[in-house]
Image (cartoon, rainbow, N blue to C red):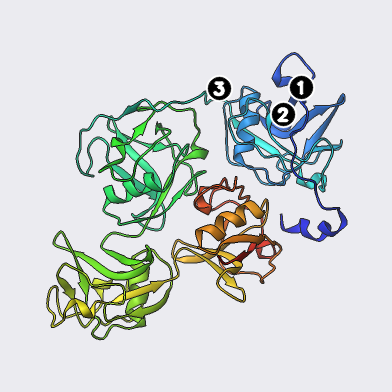
Amino acid sequence: MGFQRQERCCFPSPPSPVLPPPIATGSTLSTELRLVGGPSRCRGRLEVLHGGSWGSVCDDDWDVVDANVVCRQLGCGLALPVPRPLAFGQGRGPILLDNVECRGQEAALSECSSRGWGVHNCFHYEDVAVLCDEFLPTQTPTRRVLTSRAPPTTPQNGKGEGSVRLVGGAGPCQGRVEILHGGLWGTVCDDDWGLPDAAVVCRQLGCGAALAATTNAFFGYGTGHILLDNVHCEGGEPRLAACLSLGWGVHNCGHHEDAGALCAGGRLRLVGGPGPCRGRVEVLYAGGWGTVCDDDWDFADARVACREAGCGPALGATGLGHFGYGRGPVLLDNVGCAGTEARLSDCFHLGWGQHNCGHHEDAGALCSGHLRLANGAHRCEGRVELFLGQQWGTVCDDAWDLRAAGVLCRQLGCGQALAAPGEARFGPGQGPILLDNVKCRGDESALLLCSHIRWDAHNCDHSEDASVLCQPA
């Protein structure tokens, strides 16, 4: 929270997270904790019992994953989004827990890690509040085993059984994954969700390569049924329903776990480079991929190509087959963009297939991608920024640590993480704050696979922008 920062100097460095001793003192798990000050026993300020006294929990690192454990423990269904600070007032007793970090499958809050009993650097204006939906059935965590593939019915994405769509993003190629079953659209749980799964969705939609797989309802909460859980794709499947999963409707998730995907785009791709955001420009026409000639190709054209590919702002334009020679037809020549067009085909060109070029003149583009480090002395240090919804935004430093920095450094090809400074070490950013309470195990392949609050929820300002310092390999 932005107004906490000035007090941080007054507290010693926190110890490493530890598992607190069990907090139960009664005969049932529900006697360990309670929600007070709200309209029902399932909504209110969280209090826990320790040493015969009730006390509050600090909101540092608190997110919907932690809240869901509380709701399950109380028999109150599933957690709703984390309410605003002080929604149910301030507590008056001791602050008993801080930096609570649950994985989501715990049966009780006592099984989650924290700093330990009474160790905190908080005030009561940071007391955690929890909203549970008591009308949704509480689901006991279970060990899950992949059991089935959905029966093949529709070989392509249309409006038939197994069709997919992306909802809540800036366009049809990014958003929350929804799949059609029995005539109804439903969501996919993020358990085991990763880039191979997102790649299948992007391919099924004709949206090109997958840039990222998102978790924790990054694109907002879906409604209706959760139709797939523990999806496990190899990456080459023609459609999501062909991947292993628990089977239609079998899950133990809430909509705070809805999976999502960021795809490069539909009719333009960048190939032959070190990643999906740098390479030879290829466009789709009449069912086939072809190249673009470098005659008149310049930075304004590259800007449009990067935008259409979902790869953020352009860094440069290349020609003369810089990223290798293409093999299909040369589809566009003498492209002349103003730089503001949504698609490359909207720019001036000679007409589809009209050219006087060879593949030694294939055009390319260098794009910044959807992740960057800004304001540093080199590309491997700086303020963490993401490009989503056609604009750059920042990451809040709540819960930001060396594990998260390690994931980011590795994802950017920047070697090991040296530090994970917060408090806008490299200056405050601009635009939206896109991620808050990022909590990584450290072994994730991408930052968006770490636990985090959904993209439009945070309690930060740009004085809390997160940064990293990486050691290039």
Instruction: Report the amino acid beneath label 1.
Output: Ala
459 relative position to 453: left or right: right
Q: How many marks?
A: 3
**Amino acid found under the numbered disc labelled 2:** Ser
**Residue at disc 2, secondary structure:** helix
Q: Earlier in the sequence, mark 3 or mark 2?
A: 2
> Residue 385 at x, y = what percent?
55, 64
Q: Is residue 22 above or below residue 14?
A: above
* The N terminus lies in quadrant: bottom right
Q: CA distance from mark 2 to mark 1?
A: 8 Å
Mark 2: few/some/many CA within 10 Å (<14, 14-19, 20+)? many
What element does badge 1 sit on?
Answer: loop
Q: Position of residue 280 (x, y in %)?
A: 29, 71
Q: Residue furthest front?
A: 473
In the picture shown, does residue 183 fall above or below 372? above
- Say which label, 2 or 1, has the lower sequence index: 1
Residue contact between numbered discs 1 and 3, judged by CB atoms under 8 Å: no
Residue at 47% in and 26% down: 144
Residue at 44% across, 43% down: 259
Does residue 325 appear in this view?
yes
Q: As rendered, which of 233 and 9 lies closer to the eye?
A: 233
Identify residue for label 3: 140
Q: Amino acid at mark 3?
A: Thr
Residue topped by disc 1: 24
Mark 1 vs 3, N-terminal side:
1
Mark 1 and mark 3: Cα distance apart in space: 19 Å
Classify the position of the C terminus by image quarter. Answer: bottom right
Residue behind mark 2: 110
Q: Are marks 2 and 1 in contact (CB under 8 Å)?
A: yes
Q: Give SS at disc 3.
A: loop
Tell me: 339 left or right of 71. left
Residue 271 occupies quadrant: bottom left
